[in-house]
Image (spheres, rainbow, N blue to C red):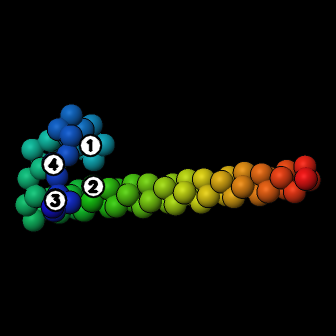
Amino acid sequence: MGTGLSYSDVTLLEPLAEAFGLGVEELVACEKEEEEPVKAVLEISRENRQKERRKNILRTALSALVMLGVAFGYLVYEHLCQ
């Protein structure tokens, strides 16, 4: 069973550091004086996870509605064709 922890794609470190105006070393240092950039990265990550969850819920709901529509259409068709 996994812990849910993983390492980020290292190719993203340089663009992330640049976006926060930091060096890569500063971004990954995780020292007390570097807490704000780390918190910002974690906040962005949390927001992205929430967006993905909402997308997945929306996809699931839309899929269920389509399936219900098809089933309803089939029942109506069967009823009218008898």
Instruction: For marks 1 and 3, give the CA distance.
Output: 26 Å
Does the CB distance between marks 1 and 3 fall below 8 Å?
no
**Disc ID at residue 3:** none
- The amino acid at mark 4 is Tyr
Instruction: For marks 4 and 1, give the CA distance.
Output: 14 Å
- The amino acid at mark 3 is Gly
The quarter of the displayed image where residue 71 is located: bottom right
Identify the residue under disc 4: 7
- The amino acid at mark 1 is Leu
The quarter of the displayed image where residue 24 is located: top left
| Mark earlier in primary sequence (2, 4) | 4
Q: Of helix, strand and loop, which one carries label 2?
A: helix
Q: 35 or 53: nearer the eye? A: 53
**Disc ID at residue 2:** 3
Residue 48 placement (x, y as % from top left): 39, 55
* 46 in relation to 29, above or below: below
Identify the residue under disc 2: 41
Q: Of helix, strand and loop, which one carries label 4?
A: loop
Query: On the rendered structure, is 59 left or right of 21?
Result: right
The quarter of the displayed image where residue 18 is located: top left
| Mark earlier in primary sequence (1, 2) | 1
| Mark earlier in primary sequence (4, 3) | 3
Front of the two marks 1 and 3: 3
Does the CB distance between marks 4 and 1 fall below 8 Å?
no
Q: 80 or 8: nearer the eye? A: 80
Residue 82 placement (x, y as % from top left): 91, 53
Residue shown at 16% from the left, 59% from the top? 2
Q: In this orientation, does residue 62 appear?
A: no
Q: Of helix, strand and loop, which one carries label 1?
A: helix
Q: Which quarter of the figure is the N terminus placed in?
A: bottom left
**Disc ID at residue 16:** 1
